[in-house]
Image (tube, rainbow, N blue to C red):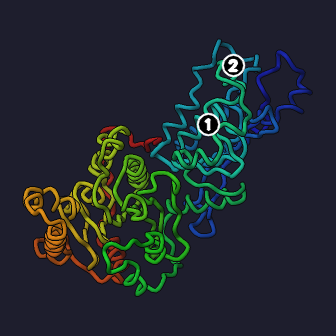
Amino acid sequence: YGSLILAAQRRRRSMEDLVKMSPADGLITGIGTVNADKFGEEKARAMVLSYDFTVFAGTQGAMNHKKTDRVLKIAEDWKLPVVWFAEGGGGRPGDTDSPGVAGLDTPSFLKFAELSGLVPLVSIVSGRCFAGNAALVGCSDVIIATANSNIGMGGPAMIEGGGLGVYAPEEIGPIGVQTKNGVVDIAVEDEAEAVEAAKKYLSYFQGPLGDWEEEDQRLLRQAIPENRLRVYDIYKVIDLLADKGSVLELRRDFGIGIVTALVRIGGKPMGLIANNPKYLAGAIDAPAADKAARFMQLCEAFGLPVLSLCNTPGFMVGPDVEADAQVRRVSRMFVTAASLTVPFFTVVLRKGYGLGAQAMAGGSFHAPFFNISWPTGEFGGMGLEGAVRLGYKREMEAIEDLEEREAFFQKMVAKYYENGKAINMASFLEIDEVIDPMETRRWVMRGLASVPPRREAKPKHRPFIDTW
């Protein structure tokens, strides 16, 4: 599309110069297929755009905006996923042929944003990506960036022009910053790896796979220590549970208290959220809640069932977390889950305490299609130790001998633990079942087979995926 367009600079340059300097006005676009060998050509269709950094540093001129608007309309009309190679410096001040003053009436950003939730949007950044290019990247569902990438809402010239200092491009939004703050979803080494990551990401929205392998499910029985005070590796549990090689984690270095990943189980694509016991013992802080809520939006937009692996003592508390708007941000998990129409499955691996556990179960323990527990599950309105200290404060204060007080404390914790065991929870139907860990995959696969196709209700508003 538009391979013959030239930069809107005919008033200042000759046609000969423009042909040499601005082929396609620095934006290459076209329709192709991604993963057609696995899913067939119809499901593999995609619109691809790539800024050309050799043409005016990949900046956005009037004509390449016009081309952008044209192909984004085609993507909308024909429901084509969009993959955008976004290296470039933003708006181009040197164009002379377009009428107007500031060009703020360009619809490109609006048109790309309108695709959010309609089709998968993937941006790939290698090198420098500033200003308008970065604004488009920020509208994407997923941002894949290389080790040499720099992403920022303004480049060195804009920063210096605003009197904000002099910086080298490499100092602005490097990969180490943009992964920890959650801007970049997938960090890779180079463009070749970025392309493979984009292909894998798109595959989850292209359908099930008939060819898959599973790990030895008996290993799940040993994945969590019997000693409730010993930590375990949640990534090992996820790798054992999912089809071999099917896990694609998003935002690994941000909101690390919750893992968010696209996976396959029995060949079928799903979204997975899981508490990470190695960070805050699984307690949910604001960044983790933001991450989980946006991930649920992504799954809802494209019809992916959600599997939640719960092990949390609850929402994180204390003066420090409240300074980060904890109340509003963790509540996003409730509001988002309340709007889900995709199947939601919950498996409690160990701790299921308080509001945090409810949030990991879609808002209520009876919200999921099924809510089951491993034998290691333990439950309560709040953490056992905290419940004892709060509920038996006066009794403990009345015991003067410190050893006796500690013995009383441990006795009450043990009593609460016994009452909150998974089997007792199931006897009151607060959870649906207690299962052998090696049966988890079977439950998930049976659940997927048991739910009807998603009801395509007409939404009150156009669905979209929050940028954050």
Left/right of residue 165 with respect to residue 394 in the rendered view = right
Could you tell me if residue 352 is visible in this image? yes
Task: Please state the horizontal and vertical placement of residue 101, each as a whole percent of the image.
Answer: 65, 12
Circle 2 sits on which residue? 161
Kindly identify the amino acid type of the residue bearing the numbered disc 2. Gly
Element under label 2? helix
Query: Relative to 219, is 391 above or below?
Result: above
Task: Please state the horizontal and vertical placement of residue 159, each as a whole percent of the image.
Answer: 66, 25
Kindly identify the amino acid type of the residue bearing the numbered disc 1. Ala
Could you tell me if residue 416 is visible in this image? no
Q: Residue at x 78, y 34 (%)?
A: 57
Query: Relative to 71, is 79 above or below?
Result: below
Element under label 1? helix
Circle 1 sits on which residue? 134
Q: Nearer the viewer, residue 451 or 320?
A: 320
Query: Relative to 92, is 434 above or below?
Result: below
Q: Of label 1 and label 2, which has the lower sequence position?
A: 1
What label sits on residue 202 in the rendered view? none
Q: Residue at x 72, y 56 (%)?
A: 190
Q: What residue occupies the far right of the structure in this picture? A: 16
Q: Residue at x 32, y 81 (%)?
A: 226
Quadrant in which the N terminus is drawn: top right
Task: Please state the horizontal and vertical placement of residue 399, each as a whole percent of the image.
Answer: 10, 63
Give residue 380's quadrant in the image: bottom left
Q: Nearer the viewer, residue 62 or 256?
A: 256
Query: Relative to 228, is 360 above or below?
Result: above
Q: Nearer the viewer, residue 441 or 321?
A: 321
Task: Tell me the distance, in whole angstroms, between the alpha carbons under discs 1 and 2.
Answer: 18 Å
Task: Please state the horizontal and vertical placement of residue 107, each as a whole percent of the image.
Answer: 56, 27
